[in-house]
Image: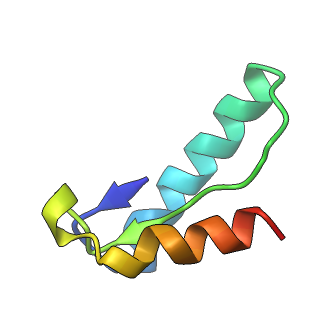
């Protein structure tokens, strides 16, 4: 998920909602990628995807 703000107070409710939705749908939580301060695709640094790939594939 991405959001314009970098404040934890903005991101925390989104994470809680994600976890509740995963639980409600009876999905397996495989984790999440949170892009703070990335309101548009152009704001996402090039290394962001590479770093996330390594974290998810360890």
**How many numbered marks are there?**
0
Judged from this view, the residue extending furthest toward the top is: 25
What residue sits 18% from the left and 70% below the top? 43
Residue 34 placement, left or right of 40:
right
Q: How is the image coloured?
A: rainbow
> Residue 55 location in percent, x, y?
71, 72
> Residue 7 location in percent, x, y?
36, 80
What residue sits 40% from the left and 68% below the top? 35
What residue sits 43% from the left and 74% below the top? 48
Q: Looking at the image, which is closer to me, 46 or 36?
A: 46
- Determine the image quadrant of residue 26: top right
* 5 w.r.t. 22: above or below: below
Residue 44 placement, left or right of 1:
left
> Residue 16 location in percent, x, y?
62, 51
Residue 9 placement, left or right of 43:
right
What residue sits 46% from the left and 67% below the top? 49
> Residue 46 location in percent, x, y?
32, 75
- Determine the image quadrant of residue 6: bottom left
Residue 32 placement, left or right of 24:
left
- Determine the image quadrant of residue 22: top right
Quadrant of the image containing the C terminus: bottom right
* 40 w.r.t. 47: above or below: above
């Amino acid at each position: 998920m991405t959001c314009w703000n970098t404040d934890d107070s903005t991101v925390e409710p989104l994470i809680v909602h994600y976890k509740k939705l995963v639980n409600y749908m009876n999905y397996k939580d495989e984790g999440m990628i949170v892009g703070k301060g990335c309101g548009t695709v152009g704001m996402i640094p090039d290394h962001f995807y590479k770093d996330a790939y390594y974290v998810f594939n360890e």
